Amino acid sequence: MIFGAPDQIPFRLLALLIAITLHEASHAAAAYLLGDSTARRLGRLTLNPIKHMDPMGTLLIVFVGFGWGKPVPVNAMALRRGRQGMGVVAAAGPLSNLATAAIASVPLRLDLVSMPSTFSFTDAISAGPEAFVSALLLFVVAFSIILAVFNLIPLFPLDGSGVALGVLPVEQARQFAKLEKYGPGFLMLLIGADFILGVGILRAVIFPVVNYVSIILLDVRLFG
């Protein structure tokens, strides 16, 4: 619905900057509340986006339209409740994105601002403040949901793997953890297949869930 055109890049950058910053800061806050001050000592318990930007993830945001932030360091040994604590820390990022999407959707859902008539950054600037704000809000909603759903996939190194390790029984968690070394390579293969070859595996998993959440929040399908 709103993705792909070059003149949308500024909106994508702004929306992802907001979503990624809140995502990573929430990981840091959850870890700190559960007893681990590592992220705080390293300056990651902050809403300063510069502290959370990953070079490769940022480049992908610019050229592909999607990316990631710098992982928050967590000392599992310092957390209360061990791997369950890690599960809570892992879940904090995606949950913060869903909360962000819900908050950003309120002005649109209540008609405090109109739904966007354009998704072009230059056209929105020309049309005035309301057009700019409404388009930005929709981009924030969209990319916050996408980031949440993507990260909840139970594949290392995504947050979903940490959530899975936190909720699985001990033996199943131990077996699942053995897959960690294969996760990053498999994930990059999936991303490459989707964005370079156009296979669409990740899209087939993510977009139906994103549409379901966006319909709940805005009564709008973001894809299709």
Image (tube, helix red, strand yellow):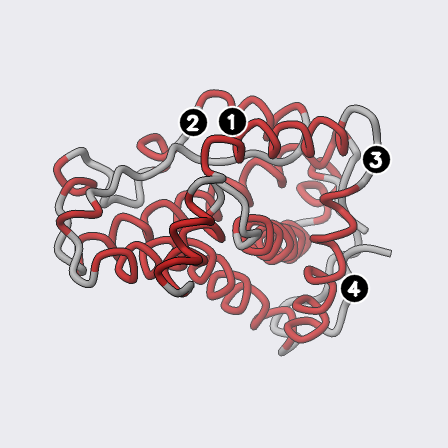
Secondary structure of the residue carrying numbered label 3: loop
Q: Residue at x 78, y 50 (%)?
A: 204
Secondary structure of the residue carrying numbered label 2: loop
Mark 1 and mark 4: Cα distance apart in space? 27 Å
Q: Specify which label sits upstream in the sequence, 3 or 2.
A: 2
Crowding at label 1, few (<14), some or many (≥20) Cα neighbours within 10 Å? many
Q: Which residue is mark 4?
A: 221
Q: Nearer the viewer, mark 3 or mark 2?
A: 3
The circle on residue 58 is: 1
Mark 3 and mark 4: Cα distance apart in space? 22 Å
Mark 3 and mark 1: Cα distance apart in space? 23 Å
The circle on residue 15 is: none
Q: Which residue is mark 2?
A: 54
Mark 2 and mark 4: Cα distance apart in space? 30 Å
- Give how far across and how far down residue 9 sits, in percent: 66, 32
Q: Specify which label sits upstream in the sequence, 1 or 4.
A: 1
Asked whether disc 1 touches disc 2, contact meaning CB atoms under 8 Å apart, the reply is yes
Q: Amino acid at mark 1?
A: Thr
Q: Which residue is mark 3?
A: 199
Crowding at label 3, few (<14), some or many (≥20) Cα neighbours within 10 Å? some
Crowding at label 4, few (<14), some or many (≥20) Cα neighbours within 10 Å? some
Whether residue 113 is situated above or below residue 10 in the rendered picture: below
Secondary structure of the residue carrying numbered label 4: loop
- Give how far across and how far down residue 177 sits, in percent: 42, 45
Q: Is residue 187 left or right of residue 164?
A: right
Viewer can see residue 178: yes
Q: Specify which label sits upstream in the sequence, 2 or 4.
A: 2
- Give how far across and how far down residue 75 sits, in percent: 19, 42
- Give how far across and how far down residue 7 sits, in percent: 74, 32
